[in-house]
């Protein structure tokens, strides 16, 4: 009977050992998954900061374009808008070119 009891205890210990091994492997797998997810979060945060910075630059560029365009300056009088259009055209094509075309 003692042999049977020892075999039962040994079998129980084997089952516990297999269960512990399975749990350890599962914990290790979850740790690796967590590390991967953490690295991904860091990469996404970095990309997000980069995109925010690019959006700020683009936003400033658009604001500058809008402020230079007479189309978006609705509070100006017509004469100021006309002067702005002429100035922008001259800046784009070079000084005096618009005047030359009007004379010719």
Image (cartoon, helix red, strand yellow):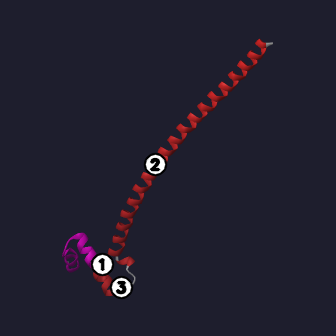
Q: Can you give x and y, in whole percent of width and height, for residue 97 in the image?
A: 20, 74
Are there few (<14), some (14-19), or many (20+) residues within 10 Å of tag 1?
A: some
Looking at the image, tell me whether mark 3 or mark 1 is earlier in sequence order. Answer: 3
- The correct choice, above or below, for 100 with respect to 21 in the image is below
- The correct choice, above or below, for 16 with respect to 98 in the image is above
Q: Give the range drawn in magenta.
A: 85-103
Asked if the magenta segment contains residue 90, the reply would be yes
The image quadrant that residue 70 belongs to is bottom left
Q: Can you give x and y, in whole percent of width and height, for residue 55 in the image?
A: 40, 61
Are there few (<14), some (14-19), or many (20+) residues within 10 Å of tag 3?
A: few
Looking at the image, tell me whether mark 2 or mark 3 is earlier in sequence order. Answer: 2
16 vs 9, nearest the viewer: 9
> Do the numbered discs 2 and 3 sit on residues whose CB atoms are within 8 Å?
no
- Closer to the camera: disc 3 or disc 1? 3
Q: Check disc 2 and report the residue beneath it.
A: 42
Spatial separation of the CA atoms under disc 1 and disc 2: 47 Å
Q: Check disc 3 and report the residue beneath it.
A: 76
The disc at residue 85 is 1
Residue visible at 74% across and 16% down in the picture: 6
Residue visible at 73% across and 20% down in the picture: 9
């Amino acid at each position: 009977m003692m042999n049977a009891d020892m075999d039962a205890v040994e079998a129980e210990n084997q089952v516990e050992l297999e269960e512990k091994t399975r749990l350890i492997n599962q914990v290790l797998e979850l740790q690796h998954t967590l590390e991967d997810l953490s690295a991904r979060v860091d990469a996404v945060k970095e990309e997000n900061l980069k995109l925010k910075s690019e959006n700020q630059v683009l936003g400033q560029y658009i604001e500058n374009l809008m402020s230079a365009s007479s189309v978006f300056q609705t509070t100006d009088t017509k004469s100021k808008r006309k002067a702005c259009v002429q100035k922008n055209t001259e800046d784009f094509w070079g000084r005096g070119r618009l005047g030359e075309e009007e004379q010719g």
